Image (spheres, rainbow, N blue to C red):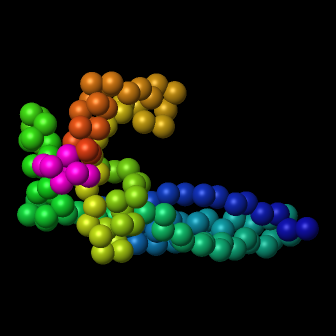
Amino acid sequence: MLDELQLTAECRSHDPKFRAKIVEAYQKAFAAAAKSTRNAAGRSGSVTVDVHHKYESFALSEREPVVQAAIAAITACGLTPETRIVDGGLDANWLTKLGLPTVTLGCGQAGIHTVAESLQIDSYLAACRIALKLASAAA
């Protein structure tokens, strides 16, 4: 039986080229660690790395029609739109990569994926109004 360690790591960047550099740095570091460490029989380990992209990064220009539609819907609801880059992995990542530019709208969540996660109901309801405007093309 071989001794084995399985490790899962995550590399994120808004720049796919920089993300590739992060992955390469992980690979080099683990390969160097395996080569420099020996067991009682004097053998060093080896490393196999499988890279799986769960989310592709993207950025949309404020001139994109989908961004303009979102801005119009938010404004029509009496709110002030803010565009920004977010770090989450969303359906928008893959939809945009597949050629369907997609905007993600906030819905009042805070502390996402933690034991302190909460939802601001007023913000959630505002997001519902914005989504309805977008879905009905009434922006």
**138 over 19 or under it: above or below:** above
Q: Residue 86 in the image: x percent, y percent? A: 29, 50
Q: Total marks drawn? A: 0
Residue 79 is left or right of residue 89, and the answer is left
Q: Position of residue 46 (x, y in %)?
A: 69, 74
Seen as rendered, the residue at the extreme right is 1
Of residues 134 and 124, the one drawn nearer to the viewer in this rendering? 134
36 or 111, which is in the foreground? 111
Q: In this rendered view, identify the residue nearer to me: 21 or 116.
A: 116
Where is residue 98? Give x, y as percent. 36, 74
Which image quadrant for residue 74?
Answer: top left
Q: Identify the residue at horizontal 29%, vertical 30% (top origin).
A: 125
Left or right: 9 with respect to 23? right
Residue 82 visible from this viewpoint: no
Q: Is residue 33 above or below residue 139?
A: below
Q: Position of residue 31 (x, y in %)?
A: 59, 71
Quadrant in which residue 13 is drawn: bottom left
Q: Which residues are magenta?
A: 133-139
21 part of magenta stretch: no
Q: Specify whether residue 57 is in view.
A: yes
Quarter of the picture holding the N terminus? bottom right
Q: Which residue is pictured at 40% across the width and 58% down the height?
A: 91
Q: Residue shown at 73%/71% (left/top)?
A: 45
Q: Relative to 132, is 102 above or below?
A: below
Report the side of 122 relative to 88 (left or right).
left
121 left or right, relative to 70: right
- The vertical placement of 1 against 9, above or below, is below
